[in-house]
Amino acid sequence: MTTPRKLFVKTYGCQMNVYDSERMAEALAPSGYVTTDRAEDADLILLNTCHIREKAAEKVYSELGRLKPLKAANPDLRIGVAGCVAQAEGAEIVARAPSVDLVVGPQSYHRLPELEARARQGARAIDTDFPAEDKFDALPARPKAARGPTAFLTVQEGCDKFCAFCVVPYTRGAEASRPPARILAEARDLVDRGVREITLLGQNVNAYHGAGVDGEWSLARLTAALGGIEGLARIRYTTSHPCDMTDDLIAAHGEGGKLMPYLHLPVQSGSDRILKAMNRRHTAEEYLRVIDRLRAARPDILLSSDFIVGFPGETEADFADTLALIEAVGFGQSYSFKYSPRPGTPAAERAEVAAEVADDRLQRLQALLRTQEQAAQAAMVGREVTVLFEKPGRLPGQMVGKSEYLHAVHAMAPGVTPGTLCRVRITESAAHSLGGEVVAE
Ligand code: SAH
Ligand code: SF4
Ligand code: F3S
């Protein structure tokens, strides 16, 4: 038997890249690769990259610099760049980083075995096509090894929305949904291997429209069908666009099934002028009405969002509208970013807000969001939640997991194994997690 080659994958960016990294490792298994968590041991290093903001993209070049000595020490080492930077800047990577042997875009990674073989023979292998074949059809069946209690499952990819700031429609291509039968089969298989919570992924996951044998399926229908899988306890989905929050999906949140009472619904700004300039296709008021309908269906739903500050043309009055929207909603969690001009996007052509103004707004926005986050956590103290325990905590006998609201919760739970759901009474709220006592298994 030949010794297996070792693969080290480093993942940047969103959850979809986490999922893709798993699938890339699986695609390379038939070529004799096992994964390692030490770059120094690897025969192949893959950087699965993100292009969403300038800082994210620059990380790739600095990481490539750090990897150079490894390549000098081991002439058999091959280095590959995958993901959204590969898609957007494949040619530039090849020119700027002679240490890179392989470049593969997010829609072509089923071709990795062939690209790896070419790179192994000394060629530079590049594939950033949007191929006609579906990569999911071409990938090998998923392995049967046991896995942890939570998993991601990509159901939809790409985006047709073309927000003026965003590279995703260019790096991931047009919206495409996987057929429901494939998703259900993959979910059943994950559950057989120990998964109890599945997060459905898509760049615009609620635009899901998979081709079933009996016509088109919506995301609501898909989650209902997934709910029928015995052994699956929880379903989440991310990321959603406000314009695609349909009545059936909102109603699904009220049905008390396996769909968790948490929703990440990015709004980006609270100013109608800026929302229009961003090409978000909805007003602040329309966003607030979606939130009202969600809360009418599921009063305890915890809401989370993304914000961009300093978008070209943003005035202090526009920014005040964003703060007002945040006050009106009350978010349980949020992600906020300073606008970063991205090559090829319409907004990159527009005059920028001064950096110090944007920095100041980001700080003020984050202070408000932090207050809301802390308030949402504090409101949990004294309540009972259900926790899916994922792994041991720092103290002996302690376990950590997530509540239905996606709060990290730790509790003393000696003898409780990962994958167990327990009722926990919350007793304390720390900076980024909640502490509690198990009341029932
Ligand atoms: N598909 C999702 C998420 C896209 S990327 C959606 O539509 O919401 C994740 C987040 O990154 C976005 O919601 C946005 O807040 C942020 N982002 C995207 N492009 C950006 C840019 N050019 N500068 C700063 N933040 C950006
Ligand atoms: Fe980007 Fe907008 Fe599409 Fe989200 S909806 S991925 S922000 S273009
Ligand atoms: Fe980044 Fe691509 Fe995801 S740009 S956020 S890795 S879709």
Image: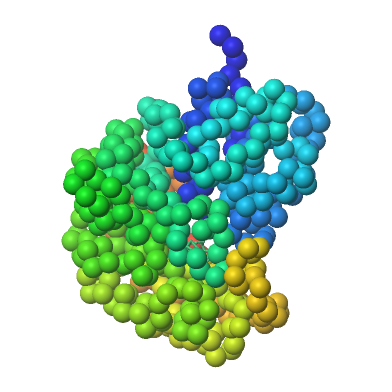
Quadrant containing the N terminus is: top right
Along the viewing direction, whichever of 362 and 416 lies nearer the viewer? 362
Res. 366 visible in picture: no
Q: Position of residue 394 (x, y in %)?
A: 50, 46
Q: Residue at x 25, y 52 (%)?
A: 217
400 lies left or right of 223 = right
358 lies left or right of 198 = right
On the image, which quarter does residue 237 sit in?
bottom left
How many marks can you see? 0
195 lies left or right of 215 = right
On the image, which quarter does residue 161 sit in?
bottom left
Instruction: Name above or below for residue 421 compared with residue 263.
Output: above
Q: Position of residue 294 (x, y in %)?
A: 27, 71
Q: Residue at x 31, y 34 (%)?
A: 189
Q: Residue at x 31, y 79 (%)?
A: 289
Instruction: Name above or below for residue 16 compared with residue 163.
Output: above
Instruction: Name above or below for residue 278 compared with residue 9.
Output: below
Q: Position of residue 295 (x, y in %)?
A: 27, 73
Along the viewing direction, whichever of 145 and 19 lies nearer the viewer? 19
